[in-house]
Amino acid sequence: MIHMNLWQNAVTVLIVVFAGGLIVGKLTEKPRIPDVAAYLVYGILIGPAVLNWISQPSQSQVNQLLLNVGATLILFDGGRGVQFQVLRKVWLSIVLLATVGVVITAFTMGLAAHYLLGVPWIVAILLGSVIASTDPATLIPVFKRVPIVPNLQQTVESESAFNDATGAVLVFTVLSLLGAGGHVDWLTPVWSFVHSAVIGLVLGGLLGLLSVWLVSMKGWGIFHEYGSIVMLITALSSFQLANMLNASGFMAAFTAGMVTGNGQVFRMGFAEHTEENIHHFGSAMTLIMRMLIFVLLGTQVNFALVSKHLWVGLLLVLIFMVVARPIAVFASVLVDKRAKWSKKHVAFMCWVRETGVIPAALSGVLIAKKVPGAELISAITFMAILLTIVIQASSTGFVAKRLQVLRDADIEDV
């Protein structure tokens, strides 16, 4: 078994991940299966559960670094694909999905976990809070292979980028309740969410504008030949500075990406060759990060722990997919009359809600803090990750075609 505690081992792990990821990624092209699902299965194959080639604990600093950097770059690249003119039409749906939708999901799953697992209410709500947010690291790559109508695609992608702040605030609020014996000042979590969201949005927007000005020839343009590097620095700086200010780093990175992808709105569009370089560099970097994140995530699935709660866990994940998500979607998007969502659009949003990087990181935090019930929460979280990626992500193209929400030019190819 190889651990990434020495640089020689780390290089070997990278070779195994990238070589295997290259092969399984190629195999998914013809059936158009989302590559993240294949990477996850490959990770399970080479992990302790099967071949036992690689072991990298989810709580390790190396793993946390890969999760944070990878998710940041994927979010930034996804934000660059969001168009402001589309966002203006669906902003209310995004806000409600990323706030009300997350809270509803958390409490619905908390209710189910309390009665099915027999755990205390506080542990049940904590479980619901951990898995309540959707995963941009999964959704954005899926939509690169299965192009959806722009308003629908950008709504779901933006929801997944913005709801991590809500999910994280919920988790740490419940932890405060757990530590305070059930008594806490409810204004604190509300302020924490507002602080996290506003600073993340403002900081990401400012850094995005600065990078556009530095790269665009219609701004200062001093770094117009180094656009890719400026984008990389902007993505990582947005995440890091927001975290230093106790705000949402992922929200800041996504916002910075949106601003840099809409430079023409600020009359500072990029030259064609600069845009092409940024696009190719971003595609390569996000592909590398997807391989690392999901292959390593697959190696960390604890099947011994999962097997202890297999049947009730399967039932919980089923409720998660077909009960909690639809309730959250109906409560969030039906009030948005301006977006003019059709029944097919709403049905698609109900099905697409993959779980991944953020819930995995949060469950790792609970284990590191030795929170009561953390191992149970980790087991259910990994079951949710496995099933939502393998079932929902892999069936996105089929569901999109049946609901007729694909972009017209791509319908014949899916």
Image: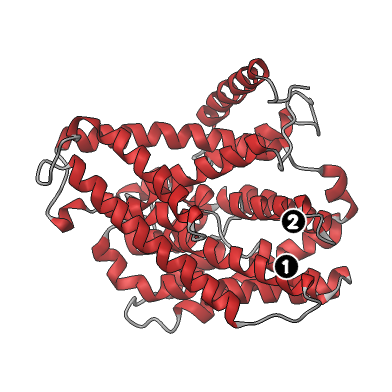
Dividing the image into 4 quarters, which one contains the N terminus? top right
Above-or-below relation of 354 to 291: below
User: Callout 1: 10 Å neighbours few (<14), some, many (20+)?
Assistant: some
Q: Nearer the viewer, residue 92 or 50?
A: 92
Lower sequence index among marks 2 and 1 = 1
Q: Residue 205, position in %: x, y?
A: 31, 58
Residue at image location 60% in from the left, 75% down from the top: 103
- Three-letter amino acid code at the position of disc 2: Leu
Mark 2 touches mark 1? (CB < 8 Å): yes
Residue at image location 65% in from the left, 64% down from the top: 321
Q: Residue 378, position in %: x, y?
A: 76, 53
Is residue 128 left or right of 36 when viewed as pictured?
right
Residue at image location 61% in from the left, 39% down from the top: 294
- Name the element at disc 2: helix
- Name the element at disc 1: helix
Numbered circles on residues, count: 2
- Three-letter amino acid code at the position of disc 1: Leu
Is residue 8 left or right of 202 when viewed as pictured?
right
Q: Which quarter of the figure has residue 166?
A: bottom right
Residue at image location 56% in from the left, 63% down from the top: 351
Q: Is residue 408 visible?
A: no
Q: Nearer the viewer, residue 212 or 97?
A: 212
The numbered mark at residue 366 is 2
Q: Residue 287, position in %: x, y?
A: 46, 34
Q: Which residue is mark 1?
A: 175
Find the distance from the CA under tag 2 to the CA under tag 1: 9 Å
Above-or-below relation of 231 to 246: above
Q: Residue 158, position in %: x, y?
A: 42, 61
Above-or-below relation of 326 to 289: below
